[in-house]
Amino acid sequence: MKNWTNNTDFLREIPLPTQTATYKPVPHSVFLDEIKEELYKKGHVVKEERYLTANNGLIMTGKYIIENENNIMNPAIYFTNSYNKMRRAELQGGISILVCKNGAIGIDTASRFSRKHSGTVLEDLRTNIVLTVDSLEEQFNRLKHNMEEMQQIHLSESQVAQIVGDMYVNENLIKETQLSILKHEIKFSKDFKDNTAYDLYNHCTEALKDNHPIDFDKSHIKLHAYMSDIFSLTGKRNLYKKDFKIEKGIYVQEEVQDAILV
């Protein structure tokens, strides 16, 4: 597994690109400093921070894990920026599972900031930093509820295999290079071994840690959307039009045609 991790000293040394009439770069430092400042003003404490970089730091994605009273899950803020126009300036609240540092980013597009590097992007980002911090508890509670819903859904080995196959073959949620990681987690995980949808979710997010920083947040959002739809979680968006249902806490797939999204 490639290590994309980096630190703030490295990120601060990267020269800011030249602004043009159509391109307005956003300094990495806005994410590094101003999110923390807003969290501090609202009484939050950053428990842990993590930065992933690619293209010599021209692409950055990161997260701040926020302290709270829950000893299993913590609120988190995820963000992305680039100096080469390959990723927008993006920001969203989420959740982090403490035991493994796996994350979850929801599919609530109304609370997700995503802007091209142009026009008033810097001013809009600063406005949305405030809004994201203000809605942090709401986002955390929404995702925490989804996690609790998945903990009540028990899966057989054949059902897990069917879901994993669908994610790999049909949806490209899991890459070929990540299958061995996912298989190992399913068989040998010490922390997630109850064969629930929640365990499978964390097996998948462990495998997704291998993703390139340019895709890191997108892959987590897509995974959460997929799981929300097939398990009918609160807030599902029906982006994956499969005929799945839950019966007595057990996952089943009905034998119907057109079950796979085209």
Image (cartoon, rainbow, N blue to C red):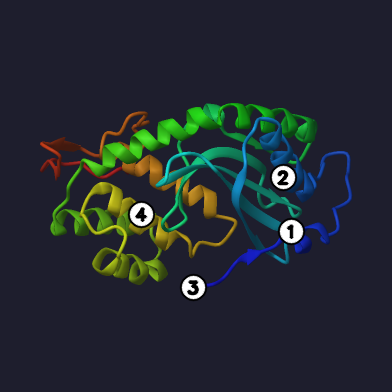
Q: Residues within 10 Å of mark 1 (few under 14, many from 20)?
A: some
Distance from label 2 to label 1 (Cα)? Answer: 10 Å
Pick the front one: 238 or 159: 159
Query: Could you say whether the residue bearing mark 2 is in a helix, strand or loop?
Result: helix
Image position, residue 18 (x, y; %): 89, 50
**Pointer 2: residues within 10 angstroms few (<14), some, or many (20+)?**
many
Mark in the foreground, 2 or 3: 2
Q: Is residue 227 above or below residue 209?
A: above
Residue 67 image position (x, y, % from top left):
54, 43
Q: Is residue 81 visible?
A: yes
Q: Residues within 10 Å of mark 3 (few under 14, many from 20)?
A: few
User: Residue 31, labelled with which disc?
Assistant: 2
Q: Tell me the CA gap for discs 1 and 3.
A: 22 Å
Q: Quadrant of residue 226?
A: top left
Amino acid type, label 2: Phe
Residue at 49% of width from left, 73% of height from top? 1
Tell me the mark number nearer the camera, choosing from 3 and 4.
Answer: 4
Relative to 7, say whether 221 is above or below: above
Specify the amino acid type for callout 4. Answer: Asn
What whole-number distance in Å separates the C-alpha atoms at marks 3 and 4? 17 Å
Q: Is residue 213 above or below residue 258?
A: below
Spatial separation of the CA atoms under disc 1 and disc 4: 28 Å
Residue under pointer 1:
8
Helix, strand or loop at mark 1? helix
The quarter of the rendered structure image containing the C terminus is top left
Q: Name the secondary structure under disc 3.
A: loop
Q: Does the image show residue 241?
A: no
Which image quadrant is residue 21 in?
A: top right
Could you say whether the residue bearing mark 4 is in a helix, strand or loop?
A: helix
Q: Which mark is residue 202?
A: 4
